[in-house]
Image: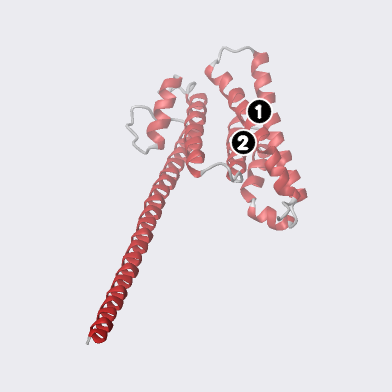
Amino acid sequence: MKLRSPQARWEQHTQRPLLGLAVAFAVAYAVPIVRPEASRDVVEVCTAVEWVVWGAFALDYVVRLALAERRWQFVRTHWLDLGAVLLPLLQPMRLLRLVSTLLLVGQRARMASQIRLTTYVAGSVVGLLMFGSLAVLSVERDSPDGNIRTLGDAVWWSFTTMTTVGYGDHAPTTGLGRMLAVGLMLSGIALLGVVTANIAAWFIARFEKDDVEERRQTQAIRELTEEVRALRDEVAALKGLRGTSAT
């Protein structure tokens, strides 16, 4: 049995705790947006939780880098993780912490072999829908020309944007809001492509399985036919011997 590397063991042991921290981040990010009347203390606690969660993912990256056998190769193959870790340091904006944490959660979830593609896609859709709604609401709610004022408006806009339907009844008016719209549209197209490819792969695998079974049955019938023909030849030969003996 092949022993797993220290990096692989670390990733297995930290998978669930980091996902739990991601849930805590989601709650901390949502509370000040859903409840804008929340006290200053609550907002500060939520902000602290967001930074702690981001710090935990940053620490996870550093530990994985230290445990990697080929560190330079790890950096080259995990460049998105590094970018997500450095992103909030360039500009301490709440939206950047959201983007970086989503990227880090997504990269760590991809490493878990027990998480199937369907579960990952479903989780990605729900996560993008929720965070996209919260992010656009926080950006557009105070815009003078904005028409996304409530959480319901934001969820509806996120859903129509991710599915690339775009009814136009709600639309972002700020620069950040439009950047979010672009991100959601690209994410929706990518996830739709993943779902389509997954369904197509399932059908292809199913057809190949049926084809293999059909070939196996055809081969069995051919072998059975040859055996029957051989038996007939043997019976005919025995009859010929009996006839010869009788004469």
**x and y percent of residue 69 in the render?**
75, 56
* In the depicted structure, whether residue 92 falls above or below residue 10: above
The front one of 235 and 123 is 235
Distance from label 2 to label 1 (Cα)? 9 Å
**x and y percent of residue 37 in the render?**
56, 12
- Which quadrant would the N terminus be assigned to in this image? bottom right
SS assignment at label 2: helix
Give the mark nearer the N terminus: 2 vs 1. 1
The front one of 81 and 201 is 201
**x and y percent of residue 46 in the render?**
65, 21
Amino acid type of the residue tagged 1 in the rendering: Glu
Amino acid type of the residue tagged 2 in the rendering: Thr
Q: Residue at x 69, y 53 (%)?
A: 75
User: Which residue is situated farthest in the right direction here?
Assistant: 66
SS assignment at label 1: helix
Q: Residue at x 70, y 39 (%)?
A: 13
Q: Residue at x 38, y 58 (%)?
A: 208
The way the protein has been coloured in the rendering is secondary structure
* In the depicted structure, whether residue 25 falls above or below residue 225: above
Task: Categorize mark 1 by other alpha carbons within 10 Å: few (<14), some (14-19), many (20+).
Answer: many
Indicate left or right for 178 with 67 as reference.
left
Is residue 178 visible to us here?
yes
Task: Categorize mark 2 by other alpha carbons within 10 Å: few (<14), some (14-19), many (20+).
Answer: many
When asked about the image quadrant of residue 220, the answer is bottom left
Mark 2–mark 1 CB contact (< 8 Å) = yes
Is residue 146 visible to us here?
no
Indicate left or right for 33 with 79 as reference.
left
Give the numbered dot on residue 101: 2
The front one of 23 and 177 is 23
When asked about the image quadrant of residue 147, the answer is top left
Question: Which residue is identified by label 1?
Answer: 50
